[in-house]
Amino acid sequence: MPPLVTSTVSAQDVPAADTPVMPQERTDLTPKDRKRVDSVTRPTDDFSKPEQFETMQGGAATTKATVNGNIFSHFSTNLTFQEEETFKLGNALFTKLWVAAPSSTQASDGLGPLFNARGCQSCHLKDGRGHPPEGAPDATSMFLRLARPAKTDAEKAAVAEHRVLNFPDPVYGEQLQDLAVQDLAIEGRMKVTYEEIPVELAGGEKASLRKPTYSISDLGYGPMHPDTTLSPRVSPPMIGLGLVQAIHEADILANADPDDKNEDGISGKAAFVRDHRTGELKLGRFGFKAQNASIRDQSSSAFAGDLGISTPDAPRDFGDCTQAQTKCLTLPTGVQERLGPTEAPDPVMDLVTFYSENLAVPARRDIDNPTVLRGKEMFYTSGCTSCHTPKFVTRRDAGNKAQAFQLIWPYADFLLHDMGEGLADGQQVGDADGREWRTQPLWGIGLTKTVNNHTFFLHDGRARNLTEAVLWHGGEAQAARDAFADLPKDDRQALITFLESL
């Protein structure tokens, strides 16, 4: 039977602990290395010229391939020849379409029974960014997370001890599934309506923000629990994930200030989650609410939740089907005894994880353009770097040498921040409350139009361009947002041009 709670751990009990032991200093560096890292990651105050190595956003892994619609789909440039083969095998699995069981293609069946997409690439289009439905018949590349808050003392303790992230809807599970195998009813369809909100900018310029409202039509299994919240998600870009994983915990935690002791209005908070296989408490750094500690954990969650495919890390053969969906639980699964006890056994997980770890970050463009340099200065002086930390040097002892000791430029601190009521979804996810979101990396953001033929940004694609995305920032980012809105028009556009160069 599927679990009754959304858990960071699969099929095992974990020790109760709410204070993780994390390194306060980097354990992988010599004193000489430490001095070099401190020097190269120090924020610049010279905007008259580009910084050294600024073009190579992903360090030696950066791709300098021709910029076109496939620019997010190249492998890390510093992979070995043998690793290139592994990457390509992973790509084949990432792009494959799964089918319902039973099927003659036994290595590809097990889809659903309820699902949001038939393959990873269906949501991560060209390894890039998803988008709202915008009139399409389905919401592929965007879905609704479903959860209710903890109520009892036992439930609150389970969240505090990181044994669960939250509590799914008792009938519809942890996300709305708008697709299903033959002869099974879908759960429902996401409905989005927008209200235009005018915004005045310095110099008399005007902008308009569209405020979304989410609902569900055609519910297939009766009413939802009245306390269930709806949290929309568009699929994020896949580039640079292995480099993010290789940032040392101490470097991320060094930027955390949950009590705002320095009184700068920024109180970044670390998220802690359980490793899906071991139950070990680790630093969360993947997902819009930092709900996964590793790329493998993020991948296994997507296999189970989005595709309804079981893996050794999340052995849920019926995906997100709940005990209330009785027909769903009687349908065939794609488990093949000769291949192992799950629909996507370890070789699949290993290859998809490797592929996801090694999608290269594209090289920066126009870094010496005077407008880009002016925009970079505006980005810094407006306070954007308080959360969008420009650069890190990855750990020397990274699991893959391709990610080891690289100077990278993600422009993110990977911490949770209160983003204000305007962006709040009201949904707790582990350590993140209903107003908190993980700072998203900005590398590659200027290539969204090139790769995905749209410019919808933020966690639900409500922003139709980068200006709207900035103007939606609130909470801890309110001061930076206001500074942007108060800039003269040319400086405001320069800041956007800088973002487009990333």
Image (spheres, rainbow, N blue to C red):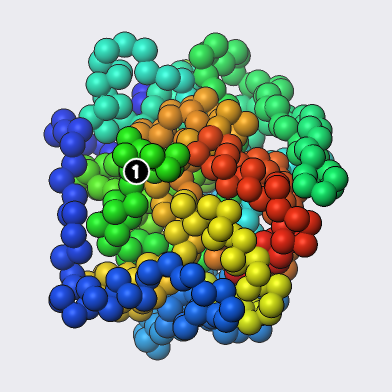
Asked whether the viewer can see residue 128, the reply is no
Quarter of the image for the C terminus: give it: bottom right
Percent of width and height locating residue 300:
39, 49
Kind of residue indicated by mark 1: Asn
Q: Residue at x 19, y 80 (%)?
A: 32
Relative vertical location of residue 389 with respect to residue 315 in this rendering, above or below = below
Q: Residue at x 33, y 63 (%)?
A: 247
Percent of width and height locating residue 326:
48, 21
Give left or right: position of 384 versus 408.
right
Give left or right: position of 415 versus 154.
right
Q: Residue at x 30, y 19 (%)?
A: 156
To which residue does mark 1 refer? 262
Q: Between residues 227 and 500, which one lies in front from this camera angle?
A: 500
Percent of width and height locating residue 83:
38, 80
Asked whether the viewer can see residue 369, the reply is yes
Relative vertical location of residue 191 with respect to residue 302 in this rendering, above or below = above
Percent of width and height locating residue 328:
50, 28
Q: Between residues 178 and 420, which one lies in front from this camera angle?
A: 420
